[in-house]
Image: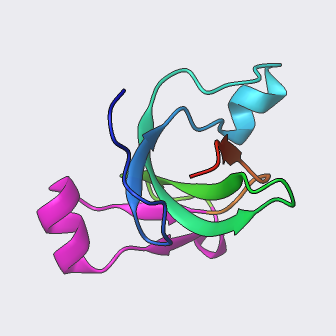
Amino acid sequence: MAHLPRPVSGLVIGYSYLWEAEFREGREEGVKDRPCAIVITSRTEEGDIVVTVAAITHSPPARPQDAIELPMDVKTITFGRAAFLGRLFRTQSLRMARS
């Protein structure tokens, strides 16, 4: 089994993010893995880690208030083009086994 890094806010991971349009089409999971930033981490009473993510995209949002533009040094080095941290359409959380 591969070792996974400890999930912390700001860590960028690949995740099958579900966009609002995909959700409205009836999908329960995104169509492909996309870069996502971990926004919040917490633990359940059972000790499982719950991670909430926001998608990172090169497309500017229709409404500017729906995203945060990443700083130039981050988007240039990491993504090579303009990138935006999308709003949380709905909480998209991953539950991880106790560590």
Between 87 and 6, the one lying in front of the other is 6
Magenta residues?
63-86
**In the figure, residue 50 lies in which quadrant?**
bottom right
Q: Is residue 94 above or below residue 39?
A: above
- Residue at position x 43%, y 63% in the image: 84
- Residue at position x 36%, y 26% in the image: 1
Q: Position of residue 51 (x, y in %)?
A: 64, 56
62 left or right of 26 in image: left
Q: Position of residue 34 (x, y in %)?
A: 43, 38
Total tally of numbered discs in the picture: 0
37 left or right of 42 in image: left
Between 45 and 17, the one lying in front of the other is 45
46 left or right of 75 in image: right
- Residue at position x 65%, y 35% in the image: 18
Q: Which colour style is shown? A: rainbow
Magenta stretch contains residue 65 = yes
Which residue in the rendered view is the most extreme toward the right? 45
